[in-house]
Amino acid sequence: MIPYGRQDIQSQDIEAVLEVLRSDFLTQGPVVPRFEQAVAEKTDARYALAVNSATSALHIACLALGLGEGDWLWTSPVTFVASANCGLYCGAKVDFVDIDPRTYNLCPEALEAKLDQAEREGRLPKVVVAVHLCGQPCDMQAIHALGQRYGFRIIEDASHAIGGKYKGEYIGNCCYSDITIFSFHPVKIITTAEGGMALTNDDQLAQKMDLLRSHGVTRDPKLMTHEADGPWYYQQVDLGFNYRITELQAALGVSQLERLDDYVARRNALAERYDSRLANLPVVTPWQHPDSYSGRHLYVIRLILDEVGVSHRQVFESLREQGIGVNLHYIPVHTQPYYQAMGFQRNDFPEAQRYYAEAISLPLYPTMTTAQQDEVVSAVQQALEVA
């Protein structure tokens, strides 16, 4: 089976982890801040806070922005459930904005129309989570302008996008957002096995997220409510969580980060080769906005069903039967039973539903060979019955 994605672990990664195992610290040592500094320098963000998952990062980002009961969080329906669940964790209500039919990201025009209606109804969002699906950044300039106009805060869910660029600058610099989130899951662009990171340029947001990721406990005298009893003293000043990342994971992250640009370049080269090889088939290949340089976490094709002699499901199953580990990213969140119980209907977001009816994620990862890619293309041809 050729998987849709896989990690690349090299000898230098293994040695980096072994070095930590031989050290005095397995957690809360010097390697985590080294990893954070390296990512901050790479992206030109002021602060980077590593945590145990991107989901945890989304949660503390929402809390740091003051999201709570009675507030609204809006995001894209075409994303993993974590992009929406983070609002529910805070007691907020969640809604969705339909996607752009070319980028598959949250559509700024749909967002503006929904904001205009929400302003009249008195239910504007407090937070909008802009998801950079497949690694391609959203139109952040437009979303930021709407944030300024309507007063909402912005989280970039860049779980797919580390190493990508928007308007020539690395994603993560938070130029158009309050907080950016990265994921380091094994199939992502670089990995720490499990892990995530929140980046921001705001001193107070960074301080708040730092507290929240570690129980709300501090040893910083400036944050304590009264004088310390002694050198052993700490205080819990907030209700936080155990969202810390380990030294082992951070060491792997530091090592992987050295190859980030090479990984993204290879992903883009493979994606461009897919574009060429699939050009004459009844599929739509991923459109790339000229302002973006995608991290290319995923390569999603959409079937032109009117020209395909078989169903979406039949194509998917045929590919799996041929040993191609295709997947579907993602089932629209509003169609999940948990969200339908809140009142969402399957056809609430028509572009998202059209995407779901046609999309298939083909294998794409840096160590994929051209021979493997040719095998995937051949399988697609066969599945479409147009070989």
Image (tube, grey):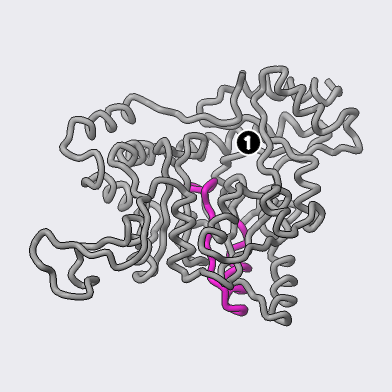
Q: Amino acid at mark 1?
A: Ala
In this image, 118 relative to 178: left or right?
A: right
Place residue 129 in its image quadrant.
bottom right
Question: Does the magenta segment cover residue 152?
Answer: yes
* Residue placed under numbered mark 1 in the picture: 271
Residue 272 x/y as whole percent: 64, 36
Q: Position of residue 92 (x, y in %)?
A: 57, 66
Quadrant location of residue 116?
bottom right
Range drawn in magenta: 137-164
Q: Is residue 350 above or below residue 190?
A: below
- Position of residue 219 measured from the top left corner of the image (x, y, whole percent): 19, 62
Specify whether 183 is left or right of 363.
left
- Decide whether residue 173 is among the magenta residues: no
Q: Nearer the viewer, residue 240 or 57?
A: 240
Residue at image position (76%, 46%) is: 355
Q: Toward the viewer: 227 or 165?
A: 227
* Residue occupying the point 64% across, 54% down: 290
- Residue beneath the point at 36% across and 40% down: 253
Residue drawn where x is 37% and y is 55% of the image = 241
Residue most extreme to the left:
230
Residue 167 shows in this picture: no
* x and y, in percent, of residue 18 in the image: 25, 28
190 w.r.t. 376: above or below: below
